[in-house]
Amino acid sequence: MQGCSFEVIAFSQRNLFSESIVNPFSFPIARKRNIPLTLIVSMMRSGSTFTGDVFRSHPNSFYLFEPMQYLSQNVGKNEIVFVNGTVRSYNESQLHDIHAEMIINLLLCRFEDVPFQLFKTSHFLYHNRLKQHYSCAQRIKDSVTAMRKKCIPNLTRRCKKANSFTMKLITVRMKAISKVMQLLPEVHVIQLVRDPRPVLLSQINVGQIDNTNIENESSSHCEILKNDIKETESDIYRNNFHRQRYEDLAHDPIGQFQGLFEFSGLEFNDAVQSRIRKIAMRTGKVKKCQYCSDKGNAMEASVQWRISANYSIVHAIQEQCLSIIDRLGYLSVNSATDLHDKKTSLTKW
């Protein structure tokens, strides 16, 4: 099993991107952890839970499910209390910076320099090997000291002993990831994208957005995606970056995941392949569930939206997202007949 070594480092007030630092990127980071580090960056309802589920099946992996959600919801609104006892306030303009700083601290197992509330989230239940930590954290109410002494040491040991570390992130944008890659250039970044039409239709179906406001919701979604894609055109993304379409994963799970694991420096072993077959390659009726990764037949699930989608809503999404649809290699539909014909591919191959 691979180990990891840490060099001694010093940060100005332990804040990589503080406005008081003239050139934050001149400060060295403790490297190297000689294990694969992977970030799966996506947007809501785009297949990230499914993809993360496969990565967490890698033996002795350390996997975090949406660790930045707490910060995304609280930066600019509430003071942030850290495990080390410090309290910091941020405005919304600092969100990308604080995201990057905390992602780096997590990847380096520097859990005392991470917000206290992050470790109390039920998201830790998404990895079987971290359920012990979740149980410990639930016994801690609001005591930072108790969390630091009773729960964090075991979590840190697990982190340092892991042979891979993967995070999946939907509330973090590529501007933050750029900062991470500048300071940790060996991190592998997978940008997981999906056709905006099923993404927004799925959000309607689970009540996350209102179809009466679909033009604005579509415009906002595709503007964020457009900005993320533009950010990845910078030189920092020339290495260790891969854009992956969810539809390709669904249609060829074994082949596409094998490519992702090779990209990330991970062995595509029997345990991983077994998990893929269990959650993505079973025949029969697609499993109905809002937030699970196990649909049974990933390919069938990926085209379910075309059976009952209202063409007028699909057309409204297309009107706002044409440039992104074309950029990612998807085809527009021109009628309800085209939409509901599953034999007609909506993808440019």
Image (spheres, rainbow, N blue to C red):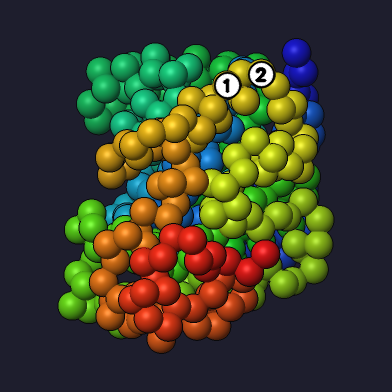
| Residue 234 in the image, given as x and y percentages of width and height | 74, 71
Q: CA distance from mark 1 to mark 2?
A: 6 Å
- Give the camera-side residue of 61 and 142: 61
Does any portion of residue 121 appear in the rendered image?
Answer: no
Front in this rendered view, residue 208 or 2: 208
Q: Nearer the viewer, residue 158 or 306?
A: 306
Q: Classify mark 1: helix, strand or loop.
A: helix
Question: What residue would you read off at disc 1?
Answer: 274
Classify residue 286 as left or right of residue 35.
Answer: left
Q: Secondary structure at mark 2?
A: helix
Residue type highlighted by circle 2: Asp
For the residue carrying disc 2, how many other residues have a C-alpha within 10 Å: few (<14), some (14-19), or many (20+)? few
Residue at x 54%, y 59% (from the top left corner): 193
Asked where in the image residue 295 lies, by quadrant, the reply is top left
Point out residue 297 in the picture as x, y percentages from the top left corner. Answer: 44, 38
Check disc 2 and report the residue beneath it.
270
Q: How many marks?
A: 2
